[in-house]
Image (cartoon, coloured by chain):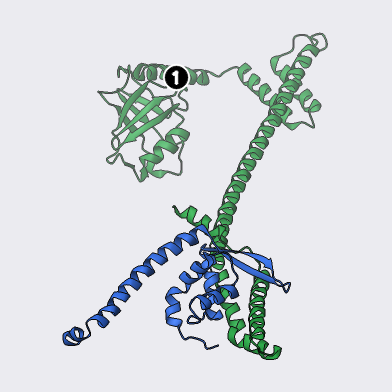
Amino acid sequence: MPRTRNTELLQGTLDMMILKTLAAGPNHGYGIARRIRQISDEVLQVEEGTLYPALHRLEKRGFLEHEWRASEANRRAKYYRLTRRGRVQLREQADRWQTISTAIGKVMGAHRVHPIQSTITE
Amino acid sequence: MNRATLILGRLSQLDPRSDDELARDLEDEFAFHLDQLERELRESGESPADASRKARERFGDVEAIRRQCATIARKEHVIMMKILTAVLGLTTLIVLIACLMLYQEAQHAHREAVESRMVAEQARVEAEQEARRAQAVQSFLVQHLAAIDPSTAGGRPEVGELLDSAAERADATFYDQPEVRAKIREGIEKAREEARPKSADEARLEQADRDLSGVWRQIVGSDEDSSRVTLRIVSIDDPTNVNGIPISRLQHSLFDERVELGFCVGRTDPNRLIITVGGQPVRNGRWWLEGDRLLIDLSPAAPDETALREPLIFEKMADEGTGASGSGTGDSDE
């Protein structure tokens, strides 16, 4: 399975994606990483070295909380879930992301619609 | 939100786990992740050995990730613990200082109480001793006087003989109580002095003393502390310095203690003394009056002060003093 080099993208959006993933329900680190990968059609692959520090940081800031459950293999699995503060944070980050992605989309769309004009202007 | 609430909020978020518990939690969390990865790889056709190796490769440096997570978990904890330690240290210091101050205060109060008790105890002991002495003296006198029998004393005894007899008996009775003996002796000697016939010169001297006191009363008024007369020094050029001896010394030392005039100096300023009548009789002829002038001879009282051989002369101020007529004529009683 090829790993996508998208560290720069994740730097700004990993927290938001973790919060969004957990909005569907409690999950462990492995589950969160796999879900992001599946939803993004294998485009976004969250590295564990980034995922776990982000999870612990979000928990420290009060956006997440955890509980330990027993796995099928009788291992302890740490399940994270959103707190109320986490939901508020997710809403704010999603709004900001929406604004930015719309703006970026407009910028990128303008080049496609008026390629000649763009060239002349430059 | 004020600062205290913020700190309390931070404190409530502190990770309560010990370092060992934190390490175990991270271990379990990462182990579960590796298990899941390994299973996923096995399900995709990898051999167990390859699945395990690849899972570890994909996960990355477990130790580095563990350190990173532990740092995040402990970061605020360490800061808050430092703040807490500082606050606790400061509070402890303040409490210690307060305790020390209270202890010193208590010690001081205790010392004062002990000293007061000792003083009171000493006063009580002295009072008891004095009472015992007085009782002993009184008992002695009563018993001694009651024991005098004119028939055995050879008729009517002389006062001197009685006193001699009393003194001898006191010495014998109180041979081991020198203080009582001294008291009785003192009383006996006073009585002897009173009973002693006066010579003509002594009688005249006492009369002169009484006369001078009468003159003094005439000048300065009634014999009360509130009666004052203002006198000006007229025998010296520089009243602030009496021949090398400052007025203040005259005021506090010579006038109060040596001149024995029976008045004390109330206050002084550069050129006059204000003298308060103390009500004591004048003795030894160390002052005399010439018209309105008061002359004080200090030489007998201060033999080592050669500069004071000449008498000091004071003049009553015209505008001050109470009840002084200034018409008396004093005589030296030397």
Q: Is residue B123 at least partly visible in the picture?
A: yes
Q: Is residue B117 left or right of residue A98?
A: right
Most foreground residue, A59 or B218: A59
Residue B288: x percent and y percent? Answer: 38, 26
Q: Is residue B38 above or below residue A21?
A: below
Q: Which chain is green?
A: B
Q: Quadrant of residue B264?
A: top left
The crowding category of the residue bearing disc 1, from other C-alpha atoms within 10 Å (few below 14, some 14 to 19, many at least 20), is many
Most foreground residue, B53 or B124: B53
Q: Is residue A69 left or right of residue B68?
A: right
Q: Residue drawn at (60%, 88%), measured in percent from left and top?
A: B57
Q: Is residue B216 above or below residue B298?
A: above
Q: Is residue B299 at least partly visible in the picture?
A: no
Q: Residue drawn at (44%, 52%), measured in percent from left and top?
A: B2
Q: Which chain is blue?
A: A
Q: Residue drawn at (66%, 84%), measured in percent from left and top?
A: B43
**Residue type at the position of mark 1:** Ala
Most foreground residue, B273 or B327: B273
Q: How many marks?
A: 1
